[in-house]
Amino acid sequence: VSSPPSPAQVRKALSGLKERAEICFFGGSFTCLPLPRQREYLDCLADAPPGSTVRLSTHPECISPAILEFLSSYPLSMIELGISSLDDRVLSLCNRGYRGEEALAALGMVLDRGFHGGAQMMIGLPGQSEESSFEDLKRLAGLARGRDLTLRIYPCLVLEGTALERLYREGAFTPLDVDRGVRWSARLLMLCRDLGLPVQRIGLHESDTLGASVAAGPYHPAFGELARGGELAMMLARESPAGPWTVPRRLTSLMRGHGGYGLSLLAEETGLNPQEAAERMTFVDD
């Protein structure tokens, strides 16, 4: 794991920008840093073009009224919390160190202060079921009540050299495969749409090192697109179980890409074969 850039390095990078930008402090629990260190990083915004904003991610246990009061003096576009799950059993098995109600309370504080909140949720965790994750979304929607809350959904991957890999090798943990992970994610996306919860990303950000470090689990470079294709297939099947279907042309890859995964799932959902499903689908400009 590489070291984070120093405040001086951040200032240098920002001073070279010509247009306003969103500066993101991700990959760690920002508000768990000592307050003077947080201030050093946030004060770097003075070197960015006018109108620039900050987005950060942090641990639910590192949110408090005092921290939010401190952050309120900076132009924050979003505060994201790495919640993972709201199921106490899942959180305990994952050694997250907090209960679901505590995570909800932290997120509630963020929203109550008028910040745009973010919740980073996961699927395929030890002890987690689809029903558990669906209940998580309903609790989040109940907390938001129309306020700005955006989600990220990540699949649980087994990384080399971790405690989870040891459990996997011992047969104590069975990770999802790609197909199950995609279908689970697609159903979550459907529920998010029904609940009015926007999802800004599904699947981990691809990097040069991620694929090489995965020992098991639903890893795919295009996981997000597969999940979006699954969501579209399930939506079409729900709205018109036998077709015909009209799909915006810009979504063609969700149906026909990756070996026609979305189209195959639509056929499965409707009891058709892929050729029949394709014949009942029309792509149009929108």
Image (tube, rainbow, N blue to C red):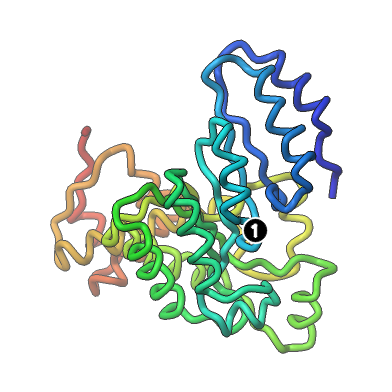
Q: Nearer the viewer, residue 45 or 197?
A: 45
Q: Amino acid at mark 1?
A: His
Task: Please state the horizontal and vertical placement of residue 268, each as a whole percent of the image.
Answer: 31, 71
Q: Nearer the viewer, residue 251 or 48?
A: 48
Quadrant location of residue 128? bottom right
| Number of marks in the rendered image | 1
Taking the spot 86% from the left edge, 43% from the top edge, the residue there is 3
Is residue 235 placed above or below 26 in the rendered structure? below
Q: Residues within 10 Å of mark 1 (few under 14, many from 20)?
A: some
Taking the spot 50% from the left edge, 57% from the top edge, the residue there is 119
Is residue 166 placed above or below 213 in the rendered structure? below
Task: Please state the horizontal and vertical placement of residue 144, each as a whole percent of the image.
Answer: 36, 57
**Does residue 56 appear left or right of residue 191 in this picture?**
right
Can you name the residue that lies furthest to the top here? 18
Task: Please state the horizontal and vertical placement of residue 248, each as a whole percent of the image.
Answer: 25, 41
Is residue 192 placed above or below 248 in the rendered structure? below
Quadrant location of residue 213? bottom right
Quadrant location of residue 132? bottom left
Residue matched to label 1: 59
